[in-house]
Amino acid sequence: MSILDDIEEVSSQILSSFPPSFIQFLETNDIDPTIYTVQSLPRYIRLNTQFPSSQLPSLSDLSSQLDCTQIHQIPNFPHFYSLPSVIKIVNSLAYKQGKIFGIDLSSAIAVYSLDIHPNDQILDLCCAPGAKLCLISNLLDSKGVGTITGVDISKNRLSVCKNLCKKYKLAKVRLFLEDGTRFNVLAPSYLEPIKKIIEKNRIQNDNKNEVRELSFKEFGEIQCSDKNDLIITPFWTPKILRNDPQKRDNKYLYDKVIVDAECTHDGSISHILKYEKSGWENFEKNFLNPDRLNSLWDLQRALLQNGWNLLKPGGILIYSTCSLSKKQNEDVIGWFLANYQNAQLETIPNIENLKTAPPKLCNNNVDLFKVARFDPIHSKTSGFFIAKIKKITEP
């Protein structure tokens, strides 16, 4: 029996365990079922560079703490490592100290595609459960006045984000419990507290080789609950962003926006296999409900539109999902490019050494060769879709 025959046999076995509704979903969306035969994808971690480099674990430290020799640095992605999926990181000293965090490589590529600079004002419109916030914060670093605004509609998931912000010392992040399709708070305009701390650090470290990272204790924190008629009170924010007046001037539109949109999660292999073991009833109810599928495309388009409205001219928007469905990916981007003449599709950077799956033809035949599709077979990551769009000033 050939390897192809083996794959076909395994695929048939897996397909036989899927409910008819999911099989129909895969067929309708032209999703290759063999991706679900790949059950040993690497686990990915990143060093939390909020800490000075001298305090971060080395490769040998990680190998010792995780009792693993199969840890590899990822080319083109600094401080990023892969390790076998069976390795648990939660008991390691580095994890307990908040010096490493887990994030899939495909999700990280979406963040890197923002091309983040220290003074960027960044909006993460569907921010839960928070790994993207950690990486965005790391890339902003402490040398500029850049901030992150995270939005999510789920209080429970946003609470997880809040805990991550505290654990990983994400000092310039504010969180809003809001509907991402309607959120309209612009980037912070009152940045003087950040500027003062940066200047204080600069003066204190003029004669040192390594700049001290901003201390989270200097920022403090506040759990927000009071409401008033003039501003939308954040769900959680550090004190340095607490007094932002939420000005409505267009100069406070965001420099970068990421819309990691709600989707059917069919690209998350661990997510799908979890239901294979525990039962498909909840998956069919939560993700394959016909009413939900019919409304999901509208939701994704609305999130994309609102993110675009909050983006500065010249800014970058990333649209991503963990679905491999053409309707939730290429069709959404094709529709958007056809309707927004100031939208220009850009190439996803730093993926030359990664194999990606070819994009699918969208309904209106817009050329989408610059989008990126990741899947377990091609890229050895979870299934993921990324489109990078620039808001050009002249259509």
Image (cartoon, grey):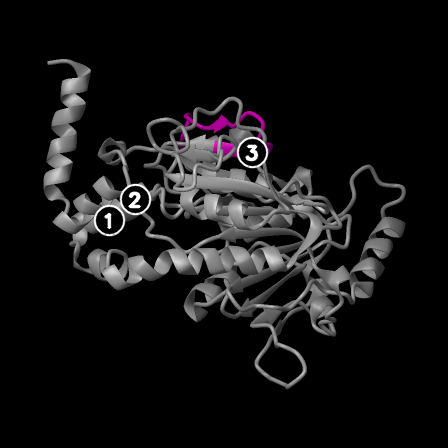
Asked whether the residues under the numbered discs 1 and 2 touch, taking CB atoms below 8 Å apart as contact, a structural biologist would say yes
Q: In this view, does 247 lie above or below 13?
A: below
Position of residue 126 relative to residue 3, above or below, is below
Quarter that holds the C terminus: top right
Give the camera-side residue of 132 and 97: 132
Looking at the rendered structure, the kind of residue marked 2 is Ser
* Image side of residue 95 versus residue 192, left or right: left
Question: How far separated are the C-alphas under marks 1 and 3?
Answer: 31 Å
| Viewer can see residue 126 | no
Place of residue 214 in the rendered image (x, y in percent of width and height, measured from the top left): 73, 54
Q: Residue at x 51, y 41 (%)?
A: 387
Q: How crowded is mark 1: few (under 14 residues within 10 Å), some or many (20 or more)?
A: few
* Residue indicated by mark 2: 270
Span colored in magenta: 67-81
Q: Residue at x 52, y 46 (%)?
A: 338
Q: In the visual, does 227 lie left or right of 10?
A: right
Q: Do the residues labelled 1 and 3 touch (CB within 8 Å)?
A: no
Q: Which amino acid does label 1 sit on?
A: Lys
Viewport quadrant of the N terminus = top left
180 up-or-down from 26: above or below:
below
Residue placed under numbered mark 1 in the picture? 274
Under circle 1, the secondary element is helix
**Toward the viewer: 74 or 7?**
7
**C-alpha distance separating marks 1 and 2:** 6 Å
User: Marks 3 and 2: which is nearer the front?
Assistant: 3
